[in-house]
Image: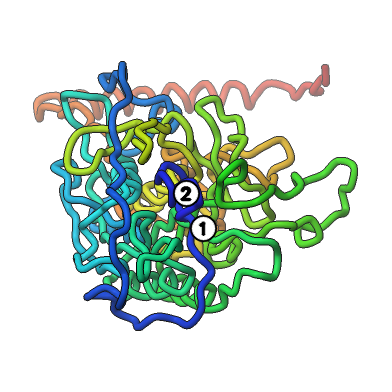
């Protein structure tokens, strides 16, 4: 979303405008009249930051053990965002297109898309504790929004639901296997005008692409003007999800085709800003975030135009954790289709007390369980691409083979003799205790 806060400072889910006619499919060069209207936002390390150890969010996710089974190899993750700047720790980055400026998508004037991409596929380093979930995945950078660009110098930031729809179709053309959308348009029910976007994400799902989207943020200056009631509601247990919706978020609300991700803190508590709704699939950490800075290095904050720092947080940064897990699952279980991958992620999540609720969905994503759990047939189950091979048994020397065979024969005879003796004894009634 290039949310109002993201649009202003790019530190939470980006909010997308609700605009008119669909744009042309391709966006290179930029749309007529689009130009930069403010200085680029910078992702920085706050004073006193220590990146030696993994961030609280990364410790909570604990995804490194999953690398024994999958690292995202051969997966193409499209990051539809503010662009992704080239970074030494994004080992495989491709330009996918630009609906804002004249780049190939690998230009990021907001820092947001680069941070998102880092959480998905940032490589580890001996100099710090940071790593992305799927470090061997390829990132396809598609810039479709920016808080620092606008059309004809007006106040409306670049990007709307129609450019977002076009970006989804561009990701399909770029052969993405996973699409991450950390952008949201959020309005009162019935005013989204997102039919074109809904058709695009349906097309992606039908073409076997996992679409992961941020749930949206609420609060002062955030994407969404209010929150929805929590479900299930113990006072109204029969209330349906549709009955409770006051605010809708797109594309998160297309739950049949999109895996919508809510945010929790490093203790697993739902974040105060995470938008509740009947479309939420799972949750992941959206607070205590450390990721890649624009160009090089690590960042945990965005520097706003007024010089103030804001933490990197929001459902925008919960979504890429889940997109990274989707890349792991796609590598590990290549026979699963997109909707089965989503089902597997949901069924292996740490579920809330009610089994599902409107803040965390089916629960907090579990990367290791997602790539190792043995699920019943039809529930995101599939034979993995490769099986863990047990350590070989100690090799026997040829000189001991005859001896071992003789010992086995003697043991079999002894067992048969004992069995025969027992059979000759009179039967006894079995007691139940």
Left/right placement of residue 9 relative to residue 138 reads: right
Tell me the SS state at disc 2. loop
Query: Is 51 or 415 nearer to us in this picture?
Result: 51
- The reply to whether residue 70 is visible in this rendering is no
Task: Please provide percent x and percent y for residue 183.
Answer: 46, 56
Res 372 → quadrant: top left
Left/right placement of residue 328 relative to residue 424 reads: left
- Dot 1 crowding, Cα within 10 Å, few <14, some 14–19, many 20+: many
Mark 1 to mark 2: distance in Å? 7 Å
Residue on which the image places disc 2: 13
Q: Name the residue rendered at 25%, 26% in the picture.
A: 406
Q: Earlier in the sequence, mark 1 or mark 2?
A: 2
Circle 1/circle 2 CB separation < 8 Å = yes
Scheme of colours in the image:
rainbow
Res 23 → quadrant: bottom left
Query: Is 178 or 275 nearer to us in this picture?
Result: 275
Label drawn at residue 246: none
- The reply to whether residue 420 is visible in this rendering is yes
Task: Please provide percent x and percent y for residue 103.
Answer: 19, 65
Label drawn at residue 184: 1
Task: Please provide percent x and percent y for residue 298.
Answer: 25, 32
Q: Name the residue rendered at 71%, 35% in the picture.
A: 353
Task: Please provide percent x and percent y for residue 312.
Answer: 41, 36
Query: Is 22 or 228 nearer to us in this picture?
Result: 22
Quadrant housing the C terminus: top right
Q: Is residue 98 above or below residue 272?
A: below
In this view, the residue farthest toward the front is 153
């Amino acid at each position: 979303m290039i949310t109002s806060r993201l649009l202003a400072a790019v530190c939470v889910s980006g909010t997308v405008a609700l605009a008119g006619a669909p744009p042309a499919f391709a966006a290179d060069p930029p749309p007529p009249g689009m130009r930069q209207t403010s200085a680029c936002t910078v992702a920085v390390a706050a004073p006193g930051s220590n990146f030696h150890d993994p961030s609280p969010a990364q410790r909570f996710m604990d995804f490194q053990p999953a690398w024994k089974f999958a690292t995202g190899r051969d997966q193409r993750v499209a990051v539809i965002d503010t662009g992704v700047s080239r970074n030494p720790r994004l080992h495989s980055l491709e330009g996918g297109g630009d609906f804002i400026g004249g780049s190939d998508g690998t230009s990021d004037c907001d820092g947001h898309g680069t941070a998102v991409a880092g959480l998905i596929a940032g490589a580890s380093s001996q100099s710090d504790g940071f790593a992305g979930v799927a470090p061997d995945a390829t990132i396809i950078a598609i810039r479709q929004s920016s808080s620092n660009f606008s059309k004809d110098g007006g106040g409306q930031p670049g990007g709307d639901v129609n450019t977002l729809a076009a970006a989804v179709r561009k990701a399909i053309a770029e052969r993405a296997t996973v699409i991450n959308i950390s952008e949201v348009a959020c309005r009162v029910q019935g005013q989204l005008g997102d039919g074109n976007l809904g058709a695009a994400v349906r097309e992606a799902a039908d073409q076997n692409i996992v679409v992961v989207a941020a749930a949206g943020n609420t609060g002062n200056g955030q994407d969404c003007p209010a929150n929805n009631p929590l479900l299930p509601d113990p006072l109204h247990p029969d209330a349906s999800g549709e009955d409770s919706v006051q605010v809708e978020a797109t594309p998160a609300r297309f739950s049949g085709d999109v895996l919508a991700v809510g945010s929790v803190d490093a203790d697993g508590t739902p974040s105060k800003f995470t938008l509740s709704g009947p479309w939420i699939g799972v949750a992941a950490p959206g607070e205590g975030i450390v990721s890649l800075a624009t160009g090089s290095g690590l960042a945990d904050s965005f520097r706003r135009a007024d010089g103030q720092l804001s933490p990197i947080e929001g459902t925008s940064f919960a979504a890429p954790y889940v997109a990274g897990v989707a890349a792991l699952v796609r590598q590990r279980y290549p026979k699963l289709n997109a909707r089965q991958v989503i089902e597997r992620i949901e069924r292996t999540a740490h579920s809330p007390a009610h089994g599902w609720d409107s803040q965390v969905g089916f629960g907090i994503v579990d990367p290791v369980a997602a790539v190792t759990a043995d699920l019943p047939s039809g529930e995101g189950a599939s034979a993995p691409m490769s099986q863990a091979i047990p350590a070989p048994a100690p090799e026997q020397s040829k000189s001991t083979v005859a001896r071992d065979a003789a010992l086995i024969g003697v043991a079999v005879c002894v067992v048969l003799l004992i069995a025969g003796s027992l059979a000759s004894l009179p039967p006894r009634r079995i007691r139940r205790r």
